[in-house]
């Protein structure tokens, strides 16, 4: 697993799964084709805002694989633990944070 090149956007949904948990959705860029299994992996530490930290990672292409030499869109999502107040998503070149505020029902 390797961090993807960059993060373009991070969103969350408080209604799905609900129960005090949030679904985090992230869009980003891998630096070539051939990347697989994009995911948000939760780290054991929190950032300076007290937000849970997730690395946006994927499996790079195998050595010797012929790939497209262009940035490729990747997406991943994760479900937070109950009680999390926000998420900080980190890539190879940038970081995006989002605080959670439940949507009005």
Image (cartoon, rainbow, N blue to C red):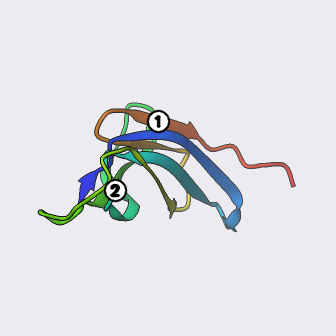
Whole-percent x and y of residue 24? Answer: 56, 55
In the displayed orientation, state which residue is furthest to the right: 105
Q: What residue is at 67 percent from the left and 55 percent from the top?
A: 13
Residue designated by label 1: 96
Answer left or right for 19 relative to 6: right
For residue 62, side relative to residue 98 (left or right)? left
Q: Residue placed farthest to the left in the image?
A: 63
Q: Quadrant of the C terminus?
A: bottom right
- SS at badge 2: loop
Quarter of the image where the N terminus is located = bottom left
Horizontally, is 78 left or right of 14 in the view? Answer: left
Q: Position of residue 54 (x, y in %)?
A: 38, 50
Question: Measured from the top left, where is residue 94 in percent x and y?
Answer: 36, 33
Callout 2 environment at 10 Å: few (<14), some (14 to 19), or many (20+)?
some
Disc 2 to disc 1, C-alpha distance: 23 Å
The answer to which quarter of the image holds residue 17 is: bottom right
Residue wearing tag 2: 33
Mark 2 or mark 1, earlier in chain: 2
In what element is the residue under mark 1?
Answer: strand
- Image depth: mark 2 or mark 1 in front: 2
């Amino acid at each position: 697993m390797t961090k993807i090149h960059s993060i373009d956007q991070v969103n969350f949904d408080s209604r799905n799964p609900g129960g005090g948990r949030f679904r985090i959705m992230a869009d980003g860029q891998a630096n070539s084709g051939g990347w697989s299994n994009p995911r948000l992996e939760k780290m054991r530490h929190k950032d300076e805002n007290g937000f849970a930290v997730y690395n946006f990672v994927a499996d790079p292409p195998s050595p010797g694989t012929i790939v497209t030499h262009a940035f490729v869109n990747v997406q991943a999502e994760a479900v937070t633990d109950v009680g999390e107040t926000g998420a900080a998503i980190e890539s190879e070149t940038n970081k995006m944070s989002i605080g959670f505020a439940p949507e009005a029902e």
